[in-house]
């Protein structure tokens, strides 16, 4: 059988807990539901780093953030870092990117042969954190409670404008891929910005939901861990707070925007059906990280708690077996998985991959591995955070903080830190030793701080950065004077005839 096409559809800041696909009683995600019904749903998938750019860089390379310098949302991603797009090019795929991938630096393709849209966020060093002044709140570009006080409805926002463009360009690209005289398979990665805050939705999506039925977060822990305290100060929730109505409105808009993302997923699936590509295309739906949405007294991401670090992961297509996979996995596993899907040998992308292929589990086989690791080196900390999730346990370490250990089988809300429990002293000690063995936290911190200092100098001197302008050739689009309309029309018609 020929290698299948791959359509990767990404949301931004979508926690699986807030989808119908993963059991939420209110949120409507019919397209993802249908994908899961005919495919496989991974029930313990994590991002590697709970922040946009590091998550995406590690996903694309299959390597840990600390190994590729993916510290934060202003980290330059080296053009010399091989990605799965590079590998798929060599394997004979047509590779196309549409939407947000948060590339920072002069390389705005990173292996993709074509890019259909610009990005939505800066491609320069504007968003560099400052661990030299970690206690000072970031102002200009950082989340705060305005996302809640300004939540609600609008006919247009910059995020709606962006996703409408991304969806339109991707839909047309799928038709172009079908009518091109090129029988190579394609890898099309499309990344939307919703349901990322600000929490503002168009009326047609807002009106899908009864405002009074929007659920509220559960109770906050009796005591916040130090990192949550830092996050709450950074987003000003500790001083400004929020009302119950603001919280309900923000969640209402988030649910609405989740349905908007899901609608675009359905539109793209429909084009696959129309062009006869549904049976030879593996579709993967996921997100770069989640959103706390008020749970545990926090919002947005940047922590390793479930709603921040978990992601939806659903696959469907040829050879995929319907079902669910309980094993712990992560977006680090996507690169080796795509290698398996493409039918090529497992390979290093310049260095050994840090993930494993999920294709055996997706096709009905066994997965003997039930673990993953995570790293966070972004804002609102002064030292790296590390996470190990293995089986029922999750362990979180930061040099400045007490360790956190949760048994997710009995405490899915993560309210009981068991790191000091005598009954689990051996478990906690083993995790602590593993952290020391896996990571040199002091050395990583030195690299982060040195990178931040250098980037702040460069940004101060040359803030323009590397914006990307998608290539268009309007002189040869549609019908122009040098074209014979009788010849051009049939070529651009699909189906042809």
Image (tube, rainbow, N blue to C red):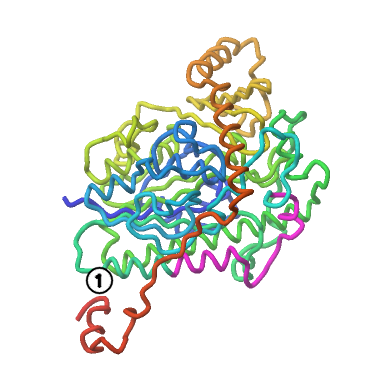
In the image, 109: left or right of 150?
Answer: left
Residue 43, x across and y down, in percent: 47, 39
Task: Please indicate, yes or no, whether residue 409 appears anywhere in the rendered image.
Answer: no
Q: Nearer the viewer, residue 22 or 491?
A: 491
Q: Is residue 2 visible?
A: yes
Image coordinates of residue 282 in percent, x first then y, are 31, 52
Q: Residue furthest right?
A: 239
Quadrant of res 279: bottom left
Image coords of residue 271 (percent x, y): 35, 67
Q: Which residue is mark 1?
A: 179
Spot occupied by residue 210 in the image (x, y as percentages of width and height): 67, 62
- Tell me if mark 1 has few (under 14), some (14-19) or many (20+) residues whose alpha carbon lies within 10 angstroms of its own: some
Tell me: residue 222, above or below residue 119.
above
Indicate the quadrant where residue 120 lies.
bottom right
The image shows residue 236, relative to residue 464, as above or below, that is above
Q: Secondary structure at mark 1?
A: helix
In the image, residue 99 lies in the stretch drawn in magenta? no
Return the residue found at the far front. 461
Residue found at x 69% / y 56%: 213
Magenta stretch bounds: 143-168
Whether residue 149 appears in magenta in the rendering, the answer is yes
Which of 266 and 7 lies nearest the eye of the viewer?
A: 7
């Amino acid at each position: 059988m020929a290698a299948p096409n791959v359509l990767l559809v990404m949301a931004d800041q979508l926690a699986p807990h807030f989808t119908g696909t993963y059991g939420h009683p209110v949120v409507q995600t019919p397209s993802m539901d249908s994908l899961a019904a005919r495919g496989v749903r991974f029930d313990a998938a994590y991002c590697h780093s709970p922040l946009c750019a590091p998550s995406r860089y590690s996903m694309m390379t299959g390597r840990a953030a600390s190994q590729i310098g993916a510290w934060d949302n202003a980290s330059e991603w080296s053009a010399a870092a091989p990605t799965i797009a590079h590998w798929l090019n060599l394997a004979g795929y047509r590779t196309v990117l549409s939407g947000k991938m948060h590339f920072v630096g002069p390389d705005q393709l990173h292996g993709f042969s074509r890019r259909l849209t610009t990005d939505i966020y800066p491609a320069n060093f504007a968003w560099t954190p400052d661990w030299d002044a970690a206690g000072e709140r970031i102002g200009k570009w950082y989340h705060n409670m305005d996302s809640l006080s300004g939540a609600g409805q609008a006919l247009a926002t910059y995020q709606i404008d962006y996703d409408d463009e991304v969806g339109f360009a991707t839909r047309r690209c799928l038709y172009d891929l079908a009518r091109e005289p090129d029988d190579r398979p394609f890898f099309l990665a499309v990344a939307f910005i919703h349901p990322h805050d600000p929490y503002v939705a168009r009326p047609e999506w807002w009106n899908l939901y009864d405002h009074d039925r929007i659920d509220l977060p559960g109770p906050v822990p009796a005591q916040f861990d130090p990192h949550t305290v830092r996050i709450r100060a950074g987003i000003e929730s500790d001083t400004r707070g929020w009302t119950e109505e603001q919280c309900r409105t923000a969640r209402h808009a988030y649910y609405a925007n989740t349905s908007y993302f899901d609608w675009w997923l359905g539109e793209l699936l429909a084009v696959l059906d129309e062009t006869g590509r549904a049976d030879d295309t593996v579709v993967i739906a996921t997100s770069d990280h989640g959103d706390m949405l008020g749970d545990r007294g926090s919002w947005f991401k940047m922590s390793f708690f479930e709603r921040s670090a978990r992601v939806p992961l659903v696959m469907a297509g040829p050879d995929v077996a319907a079902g669910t996979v309980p094993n712990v996995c992560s977006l680090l596993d996507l690169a080796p998985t795509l290698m398996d899907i493409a039918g090529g040998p497992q390979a290093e992308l310049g260095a050994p991959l840090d993930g494993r292929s999920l294709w055996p589990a997706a096709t009905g086989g066994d997965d003997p591995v039930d673990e993953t690791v995570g790293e966070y080196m972004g804002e609102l900390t002064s030292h790296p955070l590390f996470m190990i999730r293995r089986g029922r346990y999750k362990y979180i370490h930061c040099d400045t903080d007490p360790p956190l250990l949760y048994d997710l089988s009995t405490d899915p809300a993560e309210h009981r830190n068991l790191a000091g429990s005598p009954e689990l002293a051996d478990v906690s000690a083993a995790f602590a030793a593993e952290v020391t063995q896996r990571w040199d936290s002091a050395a990583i911190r030195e690299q982060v701080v040195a990178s931040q200092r250098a980037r702040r100098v460069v940004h101060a001197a040359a803030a323009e950065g590397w914006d990307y302008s998608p290539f268009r050739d309007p002189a040869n689009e549609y019908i122009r004077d040098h074209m014979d309309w009788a010849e051009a029309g049939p070529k651009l018609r699909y189906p042809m005839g």
